[in-house]
Amino acid sequence: MEIVFLGTAGTVPTETRNHPALVIDYLNEPFLFDCGEGTQRQIRLAKINPMRINHIFITHFHADHILGLGGLIRSIDFMGRENELNIYAPPGFDRILENLISIGAYRPNRFGINVRKAGEGVILEGENYKVTCTQTDHTGVRSVAYCFSENDKRTFLKQKALSLGVPEGRLFSKLQKGNPVEIEIKDKNKILKKIISPDDVLSDPVPGRKVIYTGDTKPCENVIKIAKNCDVLIHDSTFSEEQGEVVDDMGHSTAKQAAVVAKSANAGSLYLMHISQRYTEPEKLVKEARAVFEKSYIANDFMRVKVGKHW
């Protein structure tokens, strides 16, 4: 699993930071989170194939998080896309998307777009992963944070299965898939039938990898809950403590507040995102965060973060 930061600025982009967007690449499938203006160019510079993006997740409807969608959709339509595109967003996004893609003379029409509601709980499940979301606390709009989590894994204990009398072959496969099997055991002159449960031959679950992206938000309990024991927390860190008076009114967080959330959630690491243009040297934000949570880092455009396997 790899996180690719495409845009890490706040509301106003800078020479080195584009509007918010990032990709989580899982088993060579890219999942796009937010799509600020210019995201499609960032995708190309990061050497990500936009035609392979099937799922886009929007945290809220402020312009710096969505204005890149119209251009991205036009480009992949022009490139001949035929596969459907799924966009997940808080309720009410249908109308906004219609406005975005209807601007100008060219209207994309080669593929379908499914708008799916992002409210609470699981919104997407794949073979080895799921995406969940929770409400956050931002100004004047419905906003959500997303959790991309890998399914827990249980290792098949081959020697344990053999010791219980399970013959190697198709019964092994059934047990690995979580299905009980029936075997025959010779007891003196009798043949006894015995049910072997998957729990008899599988290890305890090992948690999968887990990444949280908050979008814009004040510190909130929902994020702490969904981020519990995550590998990576990507949190709004728009301001330093010096701007503490305006942070609450604007619905954002300071770097220190993000660090408190990371510590409370027992996160593996924290990446500070949505950096205000006033911080040309954001090391100040890192220093404030590390005073609370040591494994704090500034996210920069085109930074790539590997999330290692747990097994």
Image (cartoon, helix red, strand yellow):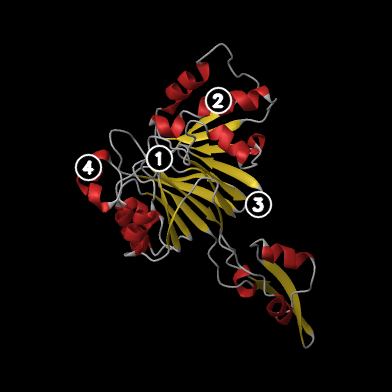
Residue type at mark 2 is Gly
Screen quadrant of the C terminus? bottom right
Badge 2 density bin: few <14, some 14–19, many ≥20, Cα 10 Å: some
Query: How far apart, in angstroms, are the residues tagged by discs 4 and 1?
Result: 28 Å
Residue 255 percent location from the top left of the image: 33, 53
Residue type at mark 4 is Val
Residue 81 percent location from the top left of the image: 68, 27
Residue 184 percent location from the top left of the image: 75, 75
Residue type at mark 3 is Leu
N-term mark: 3 or 2: 3
Residue 153 percent location from the top left of the image: 59, 64
> To which quarter of the image does residue 296 belong?
bottom left
Which residue is at 62% across, 25% downward? Answer: 75
Query: How far apart, in angstroms, are the residues tagged by discs 3 and 2?
Result: 26 Å
Kindly identify which residue carries mark 4: 246
SS assignment at label 2: helix
SS assignment at label 4: helix
The residue nearer to you, when weighing 279 against 238, is 279
Indicate which disc residue 27 carries.
3
Kindly identify which residue carries mark 1: 119
Q: Nearer the viewer, mark 3 or mark 1?
A: 3
The answer to whether 48 appears left or right of 120 in the picture is right
Kindly identify which residue carries mark 2: 71
N-term mark: 2 or 1: 2
